[in-house]
């Protein structure tokens, strides 16, 4: 069947199981947009390319295929760069399609021309340009496969506008199965031996690609083996927080005892993640502890310190081959695991923060009680998110999207995408006032596509994380960290959504109930005390270092 290269791209995405694309339209890829007109793929038009990229990242993290974003030429690619950097550092599968100038105009500094490879080659798994219309389907299939295999990540595909309209009779390529390797007998033997002899082992889980069955089996295995399970930074949904083995998270906002446990452990088993910068307290914690890494990334990008064994499989591949947990206890009793579990429960027990305005400790206690267990939580960057990390629980994988690279502006577009993907579920974005307005415009997309996210905005009038650093390094010299905000509740009401400005703790629970019952995109604008965001506050005591 003869069709244009642009239409073949759409047909290939359909065959790959893509349900949605997130796009800012451009004249450079009109033929792809034309193919989407009659497609089963839902085109979500966003208000900014950064929003499109972050929505695609959320799709890649919460869904079963790489997220897809589409933008045009230099300006669009520049705006989408933040999502590519986040997907690279977070190891999340997504593909960014960038419309390009015609082939004949290359190298002439033509309108919006730029170097695709020069911009993206250091922060993407692959950068391709479609120079041959007959390769359109194969190039898309290759990009989708590359984004998903090994260490997941972003792939960037350039689409010259003149190539897209050329005709081809190339077929939609067949879908190749993803690698499904099982751990070797020797690797499993090493794991069994080291777990069986360790007295204080710990499992650290993280990364994308977890499913309910894998998460549940691992939790049961760890509990039976008397091994506590810690999670990587912003990968808290990899294990049910009600599991007796769950002992907290590593990275910013963690309990001090969690880091002590990492250093006290005599064996560390990383599953789906590595001993990276944030997890290891800036490459300082437990670098020489005996270590097993379970990851299908052959290069183990980002791993620091010792490796005694590397099992090159996915979490599902390992978990499906594990023996019964009680066969690997050795002489180890439950005290180590039970103690860490009790300490984590004490750390996450809600309580007041003090100060003026809305007490976030008490507010998040109410939020935890009000949300369904299958809630999806999205986060921006900054101290305001730490209350969510500490007091909001997860009970299944694919229920959290947060920037592990600390990028601001992710919370709102991720919540919009999650709500479109999962109508009927509670989807809540947690962010500060600085993070919120970086991509707040994407809430308009919810109205067009049926999303109903709730955004919790903690407004302290400052960039709280940076203020904490300033007070530590340049005390009594605030500079460049204050902001004046409009009324965000009135702002969302101008779209037709539900908004409430909340000034006291007593006002929060009733406002939350009304927002959840509204059936509309909603914003709760919480006025909070700036002093609870800096050193000596909950955020500081929780161990914020960036």
Image: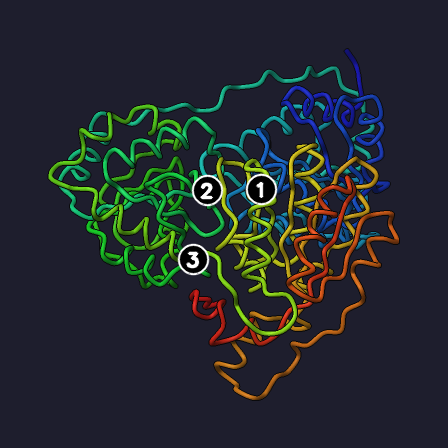
Measure the C-alpha gap from mark 1 to mark 2.
Answer: 14 Å
Farthest residue to the top: give it. Answer: 1
Residue ID at (77%, 45%): 521
Residue 365 occupies quadrant: bottom right
Q: Is 156 located above or below residue 107 in the figure?
A: above
Q: Please give left or right for residue 404 compared with residue 542 in the image.
A: right
The residue nearer to you, when weighing 202 against 28, is 202
Q: Which residue is mark 2?
A: 207
Q: Secondary structure at mark 1?
A: strand
Q: Which residue is mark 1?
A: 154
Q: Quadrant of the N terminus?
A: top right
Q: Which numbered disc, 3 or 1, marks the residue that appears first in the sequence?
A: 1
Which numbered circle lies on residue 251? 3
Q: Tell how many labels.
A: 3
Tell me residue 248's x, y (percent).
Answer: 39, 50
Crowding near the residue tagged with mark 2, few <14, some 14–19, many ≥20 C-alpha atoms within 10 Å: many
Which mark is in front, 1 or 2? Answer: 2
Q: Earlier in the sequence, mark 1 or mark 2?
A: 1
Check disc 3 and report its element: helix, strand or loop: loop
């Amino acid at each position: 069947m003869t069709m244009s290269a642009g239409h073949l791209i759409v047909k290939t995405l359909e065959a790959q199981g893509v349900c949605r694309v997130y796009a800012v339209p451009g004249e450079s890829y009109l033929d792809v947009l034309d193919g989407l007109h009659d497609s089963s793929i839902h085109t979500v038009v966003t208000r900014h390319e950064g929003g499109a990229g972050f929505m695609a990242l959320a799709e890649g993290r919460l869904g079963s295929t790489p997220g897809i974003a589409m933008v045009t030429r230099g300006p669009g690619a520049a705006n989408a760069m933040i999502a590519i950097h986040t997907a690279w550092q977070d190891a999340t599968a997504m593909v960014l399609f960038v419309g390009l100038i015609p082939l004949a105009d290359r190298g002439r500094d033509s309108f919006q021309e730029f170097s695709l490879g020069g911009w993206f080659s250091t922060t993407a798994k692959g950068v391709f340009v479609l120079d041959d219309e007959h390769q359109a389907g194969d190039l898309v299939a290759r990009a989708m496969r590359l984004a998903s295999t090994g260490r997941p990540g972003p792939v960037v595909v350039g689409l010259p506008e003149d190539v897209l309209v050329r005709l081809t009779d190339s077929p939609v390529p067949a879908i190749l199965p993803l690698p499904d390797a099982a751990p070797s007998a020797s690797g499993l033997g090493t794991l069994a031996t080291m777990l069986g002899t360790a007295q204080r082992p710990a499992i650290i889980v993280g990364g994308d690609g977890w499913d309910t069955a894998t998460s549940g089996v691992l939790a049961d295995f760890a509990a039976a083996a008397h091994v506590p399970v810690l999670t990587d930074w912003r990968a808290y949904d990899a294990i049910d927080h009600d599991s007796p083995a769950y002992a907290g998270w590593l990275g910013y906002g963690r309990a001090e005892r969690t880091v002590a446990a990492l250093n006290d452990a005599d064996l560390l088993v990383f599953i789906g993640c590595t001993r990276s910068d944030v997890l290891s307290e800036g490459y300082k914690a437990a670098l020489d502890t005996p270590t097993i890494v379970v990851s299908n990334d052959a290069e183990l990008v980002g791993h620091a310190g010792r490796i005694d064994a590397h099992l090159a499989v996915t979490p599902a591949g390992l978990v499906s081959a594990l023996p019964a947990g009680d066969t690997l206890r050795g002489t180890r009793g439950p005290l180590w695991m039970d103690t860490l579990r009790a300490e984590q429960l004490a750390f996450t027990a809600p309580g007041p923060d003090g100060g003026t305005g809305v007490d976030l400790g008490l507010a998040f206690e109410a939020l935890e009680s009000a949300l369904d267990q299958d809630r999806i939580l999205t986060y921006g960057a900054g101290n305001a998110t730490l209350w969510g990390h500490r007091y909001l629980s997860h009970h299944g994988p694919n229920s959290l999207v947060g920037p592990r690279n600390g990028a601001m502006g992710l919370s709102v577009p991720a919540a919009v995408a999650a709500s479109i993907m999962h109508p009927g579920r509670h989807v809540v974005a947690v962010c500060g006032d600085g993070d919120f307005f970086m991509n707040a415009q994407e809430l308009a997309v919810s109205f067009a596509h049926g999303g109903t996210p709730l955004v919790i905005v903690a407004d302290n009038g400052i960039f709280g994380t940076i203020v904490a650093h300033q007070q530590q390094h340049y005390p009594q010299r605030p500079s460049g960290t204050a902001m004046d905000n409009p009324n965000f509740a009135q702002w969302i009401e101008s779209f037709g959504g539900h908004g409430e400005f909340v000034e006291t703790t007593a006002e929060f629970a009733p406002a939350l109930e009304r927002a959840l019952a509204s059936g509309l995109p909603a914003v709760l604008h919480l006025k909070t005390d700036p002093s609870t965001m800096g050193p000596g506050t909950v955020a500081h005591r929780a161990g914020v270092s960036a």
